[in-house]
Image (spheres, rainbow, N blue to C red):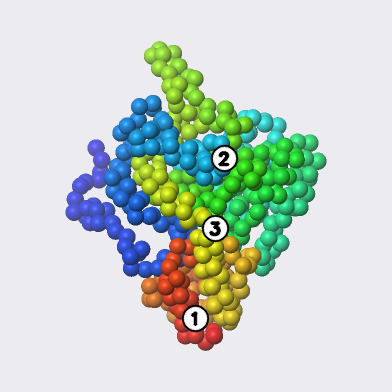
């Protein structure tokens, strides 16, 4: 029998969880701005918040084949949106990457190296490691722009080929990186991969749903997106887009049969243990937000969000000790700045590195990492111009308070 009892202490601990920061504060956390739910997604979340709620009308034993709500139609529309042949929803973009590497390892067993940009997310590395593969990094230009060049991809491809007498298993490009928010043009990388006959995966976890994506134009064989980072969905949910060339490798139906019961599960997919594990809130909120996501990736909206990010940068760049990191002007609003001036203040401040977070929180702005004053990462995505100007004003006021401007 369990040692845990139902009592008032347990109720107090867990039954009154709440989160009202979206109403009370301006949230500038880079991994949250693109995942903030639309009103339509909030409404759907309430209706479909129960665990397996999307499975109410499952007639074929797989979530991607449900027609009411229109999951089947949504996957087709998402494929059009990303301009790729097929879409599978996954547990997260990281799971999409891991799955691609797993199926390619079986398809090309002699190829052992995955070639990635040196600004790749840690989950790209873990996807490689979990598949017992090797990593080869493409260098970047270093401080302050950290640029990735196509010519360096070609150089590393040839190095791997000459050293291992085999081509890389996969080439991965981070479309927009998590660290500096640099936009990397996929077209020259896709062209290289076609020339060398290497599968190409575009990691669009920070860009799909914020910037337009065209996998055919990029010659991308795979694309990994994140619903909870960039497509206004509750997490966790990812998207794996893939071309028809790899359909049979990914959509592997179960063939096992019980030796006594003769049980078999031919509709289930082995690659995702039956069907993608997004049975309620994640997928329904992704679907509900989809019209808004399509709208906000049109050029006029993308240009406006870039304009907001560059407005903030232009107004804070003269603060003492500030250095803007990454390529400018910004295309994606994720921004990273060195804040040596604030770091110097922290040395003698009673709150040390926490003072900077305190200053912004007092002004109704959250999302800064606690205890860090040497570097500041934020995103202005989706903020109104009034909020943008208030954030800029708060930054300037804090700088002036500590004689940094």
Which quarter of the rendered picture does the N terminus lie within? top left
Disc 2 is placed on an element classified as loop
- Kindly identify which residue carries mark 1: 396
In 3D space, how far apart are the residues under numbered discs 2 and 3 (Cα atoms)?
A: 20 Å
Identify which residue, 398 or 189, lies in the foreground. 189
Residue 385 image point, x, y percent: 45, 71
Give the number of the disc on residue 339. none
**Foreground mark, 2 or 3?**
3
- Disc 1 element: helix
Neighbour tally class for label 1: few under 14, some 14-19, many 20 plus, Cα within 10 Å: some
Question: x and y percent of residue 107 in the render?
Answer: 64, 30
Q: Residue furthest right?
A: 162
Assign a secondary structure to mark 3: helix
Q: In the image, is residue 403 above or below residue 43?
A: below
Write the residue at 53% across / 27% down. Answer: 252
Mark toward the start of the polypeptide (1 vs 3): 3
Distance from the alpha carbon under mark 1 to that under mark 2: 44 Å
Disc 2 or 3, which lies upstream in sequence? 2
Q: Residue drawn at (38%, 55%), measured in percent from left and top?
A: 38
Residue under the image location 78 percent in, 49 percent down:
155
| Mark 1 → mark 3, Cα distance in angstroms | 30 Å
Residue 290 versus residue 310 in the image, above or below: above
Task: Say few, some or many: other residues with alpha carbon within 10 Å of mark 2 (under 14 / 14 to 19 / 20 or more).
Answer: many
Q: Where does the image place residue 365, in percent across and percent down from the top left?
A: 41, 71
The residue tagged 2 is 84
Q: Please indicate, yes or no, whether residue 275 appears anywhere in the rendered image.
A: yes
Closer to viewer: mark 1 or mark 3: 3
For disc 3, the marked residue is 299
Residue sitting nearer the eye, 174 or 208:
208
Query: Left or right: 9 with respect to 60?
Result: left
Mark 3 neighbour density, 10 Å: few (under 14) some (14–19) many (20 or more): few
């Amino acid at each position: 029998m369990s040692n845990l009892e139902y009592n008032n202490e347990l109720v107090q601990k867990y039954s009154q969880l709440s989160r009202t920061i979206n109403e009370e504060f301006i949230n500038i956390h880079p991994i949250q701005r693109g995942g903030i739910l639309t009103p339509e997604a909030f409404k759907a979340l309430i209706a479909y918040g129960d665990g397996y709620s999307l499975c109410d009308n499952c007639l074929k034993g797989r979530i991607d084949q449900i027609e009411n709500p229109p999951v089947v139609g949504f996957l087709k529309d998402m494929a059009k949106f990303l301009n790729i042949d097929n879409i599978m929803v996954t547990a997260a973009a990281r799971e999409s990457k891991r799955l691609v590497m797993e199926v390619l390892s079986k398809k090309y067993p002699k190829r052992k190296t995955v070639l990635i940009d040196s600004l790749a997310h840690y989950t790209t590395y873990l996807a490689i490691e979990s598949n017992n593969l090797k990593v080869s990094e493409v260098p970047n230009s270093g401080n302050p722009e950290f640029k990735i060049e196509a010519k360096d991809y070609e150089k590393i491809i040839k190095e791997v080929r000459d050293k291992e007498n085999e081509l890389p298993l996969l080439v991965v490009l981070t479309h927009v990186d998590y660290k500096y928010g640099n936009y990397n043009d996929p077209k020259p990388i896709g062209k290289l991969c076609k020339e060398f006959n290497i599968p190409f995966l575009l990691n669009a976890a920070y860009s799909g749903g914020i910037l337009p994506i065209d996998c055919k134009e990029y010659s991308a064989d795979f694309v990994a997106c994140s619903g909870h980072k960039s497509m206004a969905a509750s997490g966790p949910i990812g998207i794996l887009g893939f071309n028809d060339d790899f359909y049979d490798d990914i959509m592997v139906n179960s063939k096992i049969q019980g030796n006594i019961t003769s049980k078999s599960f031919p509709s289930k997919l082995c690659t995702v243990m039956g069907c993608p594990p997004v049975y309620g809130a994640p997928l329904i909120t992704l679907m509900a937000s989809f019209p808004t996501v399509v709208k906000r990736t049109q050029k006029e909206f993308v240009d406006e969000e870039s304009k907001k990010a560059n407005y903030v940068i232009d107004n804070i760049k003269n603060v003492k000790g500030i250095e803007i990191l990454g390529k400018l002007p910004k295309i994606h609003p994720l921004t990273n700045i060195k804040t040596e001036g604030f770091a110097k203040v922290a040395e003698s401040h009673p709150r040390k590195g926490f003072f900077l977070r305190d200053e912004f929180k007092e002004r109704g702005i959250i999302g800064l990492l606690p205890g860090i004053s040497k570097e500041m990462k934020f995103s202005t995505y989706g903020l109104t111009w009034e909020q943008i100007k208030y954030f800029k004003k708060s930054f300037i006021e804090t700088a002036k308070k500590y004689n940094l401007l």
